[in-house]
Amino acid sequence: MFGLCLATSAGAASRDIADLSLEELGRLEVTSVSRRGEPLSAAPASIYVITAEAIRRSGVSSLPEALRLAPNLQVARIDATQYAISARGFNNAIGNKLLVLVDGRTVYTPFFSGVFWDQQDVMLDDVERIEVISGPGATLWGANAVNGVINILTRSSADTTGGLVVAGGGDREHGLSLRHGGALGEHGTLRTYFKTGRLRQTETAAGADRHDANERHQAGLRADWVLGADTLTLQGDTYETRAEHRGIVLGTQMTPIRSSGANLLGRWTRRLAGGGELRVQAYFDHMERDDALLYRPEVDVADLELQHSTTAGAHKLVWGGGYRHARDDIRPGLFFGFEPGQRSLDWANLFVQDEVAVTPDLGVTLGLKFEHNDFTGLETLPNLRLAWRPRTGHLVWGALSRAVRAPARLDRDIRLPPRPPYIIAGGPDFVSEVANVLELGYRLQLAAGWSGSATAYVSDWKRLRSGQSPPNAQVQNMIDGRTYGVEAWATWQLLPGWRLSGGLTTLRKDLAQRPESTDPVGPPNLGDDPSFQWTLRSAWNPAEGHEFDVAVRRVAALPQAAVPAYTAVDARYGWRVSRALELSLVAQNLGDPGHAEFGAAPGRSEVERSVGIWLRWSL
């Protein structure tokens, strides 16, 4: 069936990003590379920015689907709500080498250092941009920022005043979203939102129901105050999800997967003389998940962070520190348990980074972070970057970094089955996985309508996670090796109303077990990654008030689960009937009736073709 979406909104930004030239897009300010604002064209890292306008024109309705817009990410749909998302390899359902933040709040789950993507959502209309860094960011962002950082930044409430209503869906989903923003006293603004939706179940290639239909309800608010040199932000969310009943397994009723949570964040920022800044941020995050098949965790996280940046002559200095405390209570499921069932963990860090202008065209960045965790103690995370501008519009950069993936409870405390005798158990001697990464990059920004970025990298890995032959197997660190790759993307403003873009990533893994390893599976258990993927996108305005967008992506086969290569085609036609009214027709996965993106046959989900109609009305 087809769906209908109705939207009314106000308080949009004064100028659409789609109206910006490529030169102006290159001057967009990003913060994830150096923890301070800098133009995208000058950032010495493999960073791609997903703009709010790109999200709107893609027609996607969820955060993981929006992340497909970044050519330096691998995004694979597992079922109706679960995704495997990574950068530079090691992709799986519990990817633990990619750090994800929403407005400065870390959203990975500390007991396994990965992300439950079915629990993470934002109102996409509120997103200002998503900064995606592929490559290590450990010096500034800490352990687990090994293969990349995803930083999701939402708009100030001052930019979202008025109302927004979104209702409808398509043949695969339907939902309702409400938002309202307005003044809060003399110096503040406030927005509140509520959204609810339901995803239809997926099926296997044989047509069997996967019993993964899901409904989600979420609400939240953001308030901002500007008081002279001070800016205050208070924001929070609460959510609840529920999947369908999964039947009976080994005599146990597989009740629906349920999850719920809430978070609250406060941030104070003061602008200092000379362009410096002082910032203090704190948040609390609570999560519960009930999965009778796996486990039933309840997790509380409290985090405090301070950061100061200043400029002194040729030096741009940023330093700070933070403390995080997590408490969890993990009840066993049918297959897995944790021993002990309850644990409290603490992390503390101090970091400093200095960007030095050696000459007007040559910059050197030196950074160092000390981070302490309860499993391995003190970890040292250094970083060296060079940035050279041979002429206007060109940037050549290189980086040498050390990053670690620190142990989590999944490495030390996991038990299969939840009661002895155990087939597999966490390793009491499991230590951090280590990556030493060398990168060389080039960025181009020409007024003639071309922009692009290319990066080559090699990562030297030590002590990667491995196992032993069951029974009585333990998690160990018995795999070493290297990964290599190239990632590149470019944009061409072919005509004033027609923009083309494309991206390509390649990956090669050369991993081997240590001689003393007894792991019968070997390195393939470290993720399932395509050797290449490419994307092509066209954003065309054929006439005033009309938009036609097409995206094509090709993903190579996944070797471990024998997932065939596939080509997906998405299209959107948008008609701005008037200044206030917009109608869109969105079609996804037109390349074939259905294809698998992750997991083993025959039980894996097929991602099917879908169509929807969307109506947007702005006030």
Image (cartoon, rainbow, N blue to C red):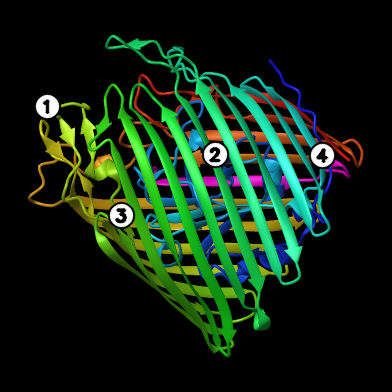
Residue 24 bears which disc, if any? none
Q: x and y percent of residue 248 in the render?
A: 35, 10
Q: Nearer the viewer, mark 2 or mark 4?
A: 2
Inter-mark Cα distance, 2 to 3: 26 Å
What range of the chain is rendered magenta? 528-546
356 is within the stretch colored magenta = no
Whole-Å distance between the Cαs marked 3 and 1?
28 Å
Q: Residues within 10 Å of mark 1 (few under 14, many from 20)?
A: few
Q: Secondary structure at mark 2?
A: strand
Vertical side of 294 occupied by 44: above or below: below
What is the tally of numbered marks visible in this picture?
4
Residue under numbered circle 1: 421
- Answer whether labels 4 and 1 touch (C-beta < 8 Å): no
Provide the residue designation for mark 3. Answer: 406
Q: Earlier in the sequence, mark 3 or mark 1?
A: 3
Q: Quadrant of residue 527?
A: top left
In terms of sequence position, does the residue under pointer 2 or pointer 1 come before the other? Answer: 2
Residue placed under numbered mark 2 in the picture: 262
